[in-house]
Amino acid sequence: MTRQPFSTETTAQSAPTAPATAVAATPDRAALQAVLDRAAAPGGAPGIAVDVRDGHGAWFGSAGVSDTGTGDERRPSERFRIGSTTKAFTAALVLQLAAEGRLGLDDTVERWLPGMVAGNGYEGRAITIRQLLNHTSGIFNYGNDARFFTKGVGEAWFRHRYDTYAPEQLIRIGLATPPSFAPGDAFLYSNTNYYLAALIVEKVTGDPLAEALAQRIARPLGLTGTYLPGTEPAIRGPHPRHYSTLFASDARPEVHDATEMNQSFAWAAGGIVSTLGDLQRFFGALLKGHLLPAEQQREMFTTVDTAGPVPWIPGTRYGLGVFSWALPSGVTVWGNAGATYGSWTCAMGSRDGRNLLTGQLNGDWSGLGVLGDLLTAEFGSTAGS
């Protein structure tokens, strides 16, 4: 996820207190719809869609369009690239294997990937799987390597959009920059961590990550729109176009259609395609404790401070593939969120999973501020920490 300024604007609503015997009224989501409308106003994202589930049922809201050429509206069934929201899936696979006794969170990287993390100040014997998942390993994020990053900016993106990267190749890019702290000493958000964790999943299971995801999570939960595309550039099934400024620094950058691309550069850290409904089912199961045993559930939601050499999102703490976010209103929500070319996604809600919002913008220049506004409008003071 890219850090961007975030709005503290909120909309408050008041309602008369109901008698103790009355059934609670269905929430009025006018404030949430107002955030959607603002997000898709001229200059904002082409389109935005959210799915909210609570004790009253489901609510779908949208604004703007899926395709600026056809004017098609956003639909609940659309598939889209979920960016770093992928990390919750990868971490869940690791924790399932830990629950089965097939690996330990305090196993070292060297035990499972001998010789892969060594030299240039790195020592795989000192880095644990837990530290990979909560970003305290100290391993540099390959995506922040200057030479690699420039391949995805502006016109260079078109030349490289179909490039294929092997996991080991991107890990080597990350390890080419020395660590800025010893393992466990601080927090540094790094996609390299999740490539290493995914290789460990493949080593333990004997299956490609995409198949482990399908067998262990997607099929059991009925996530029919969720898959890891690997090198496949097109999005299967109905989907919004993904519009991007390609990291241009111009005051008024040109917007491009970035829907088709090879996302092997994101893979276990940000490559999954999913839907609003599938994210509801996955994160609902995760937050409610239906996907992992109690011990692994506790591990996943044990968090560390995200302050570090490169400060992350203000008000957050990171667990194992999930994070908590204290909103400007003081409410804390849980889940994950992410961005990739042409897409911002979030799946966050109350810690018990009873109230959950999943949302997606099909433009990448709006970002984190919109997600914060959506969550603040929905949860107000109800989510709890």
Image: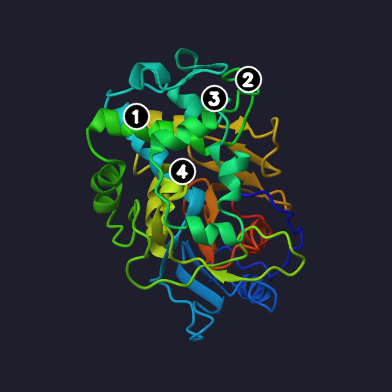
Q: CA distance from mark 2 to mark 4?
A: 22 Å
Query: Which residue is located at x 34 percent, y 21 percent?
Result: 112
Q: CA distance from mark 2 to mark 3?
A: 8 Å
Per the model, the C-alpha gap separating discs 1 and 2 is 23 Å
Q: Which mark is residue 185?
A: 2
* Side of 302 where 316 appears, left or right: right
Q: Name the secondary structure under disc 3.
A: loop
Dot 4 falls on a residue whose secondary structure is: helix
Q: Which mark is residue 278?
A: none
Q: Earlier in the sequence, mark 4 or mark 1?
A: 1
Q: CA distance from mark 4 to mark 3?
A: 15 Å
Residue 77 on image: x %, y %: 38, 71
List the residue tagged with mark 4: 269
Tell me if label 2 and label 3 are in contact, CB under 8 Å: no
Colouring scheme, one of rainbow, by chain, secondary structure, one colour:
rainbow
Q: Is residue 317 above or below residue 344?
A: above
Residue named by callout 1: 200
Q: In the image, what residue type sits under mark 1? A: Ile
Q: Earlier in the sequence, mark 4 or mark 3?
A: 3
Q: Residue furthest bottom?
A: 70
Q: Which residue is mark 3?
A: 137
Query: Is the residue 39 above or below the residue 125 in the image?
Result: below
Q: Nearer the viewer, residue 58 or 239?
A: 239
| Disc number lying in front (1 or 2) | 1
| Residue 139 visible in rendering | yes
Sequence-first disc among 1 and 2: 2
Mark 2 vs mark 3: which is more N-terminal? 3
Q: Where does the image place residue 313, in percent across and percent down from the top left?
A: 67, 44
Kind of residue at badge 4? Ala
